[in-house]
Amino acid sequence: MSIAVGDTLPQATFRVMTENGPAAKTTDDIFKGRKVVLFAVPGAFTPTCHRNHLPGFLEKADEIKAKGVDAIAVTGVNDVFVMDAWAKSTGANGKIEFLSDGNGDFAKALGLALDGSGFGLGTRSQRYSMLVDDGVVRSLNVEDTPSKADVSGAENLLKQL
């Protein structure tokens, strides 16, 4: 069963890149006492994620934060080094938090894992966006097709704030 509006996020540990290398961050570290826009991608550097989904949130970051959002974060089933390279290559480093869900534990706990093994990708995350307020899901937008970023895009989420 998938997470739904009104549910509390499950406990999970992400990996993030710091000045001292990879570090662990829990869902509490990221979401407790904060209003956070979280979006998920099937894979860093993949076409829709790299050319559409992430750029939309980067472009709308100031507008989103002006609506009372404390942070914008992206997660994907990629290792912390790939997520860090993606942050740096897109200019999003410092503007969007990059959360590595390397084993897909968070995606699975949400009920939003995607079987990409037919494309050689293994387990990935479905594409979605959500507004999380103090750990509770306030809005949730899951794409029907991984190659689209319309329902889960920044423009649609901005309308929900």
Image (tube, rainbow, N blue to C red):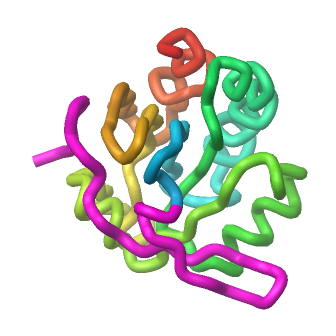
For the view shown, which residue lies furthest in the bottom direction? 20
Q: Is residue 40 rendered magenta in the image?
A: no
Using the image, determine if residue 128 lies above or below residue 13.
Answer: above
Using the image, determine if residue 54 lies above or below residue 141.
Answer: below
Asked whether, in this view, residue 135 is left or right of residue 75, the answer is left
Residue 8, horizontal then vertical, whole percent: 25, 46
* Residue in front for this viewpoint, 20 or 44: 20
* Residue in front for this viewpoint, 10 or 46: 10
For the view shown, which residue lies furthest in the front direction? 33
Residue 102, horizontal then vertical, whole percent: 48, 77
Q: Judge whether residue 117 can be spotted in this image.
A: no
Q: Residue at x 32, y 72 (%)?
A: 105
Q: Quadrant of residue 3?
A: top left
Q: Is residue 20 rendered magenta in the image?
A: yes
Asked whether, in this view, residue 50 is left or right of residue 37, the answer is right
Residue 91, horizontal then vertical, whole percent: 89, 51
For the view shown, which residue lies furthest in the left direction? 1
Q: What is the count of numbered marks?
A: 0
Q: Quadrant of residue 12?
A: bottom left
Using the image, determine if residue 23 lies above or below residue 134.
Answer: below
Q: Residue at x 42, y 38 (%)?
A: 132
* Residue in front for this viewpoint, 93 or 46: 93
Residue range (magenta): 1-29
Q: Judge whether residue 19 can be spotted in this image.
A: yes
Q: Residue at x 62, y 84 (%)?
A: 23
Using the image, determine if residue 128 lies above or below residue 62.
Answer: below
* Residue in front for this viewpoint, 126 or 69: 69
Q: Residue at x 36, y 33 (%)?
A: 142
Asked whether, in this view, residue 97 is left or right of residue 150, the answer is right
Residue 85, horizontal then vertical, whole percent: 79, 70
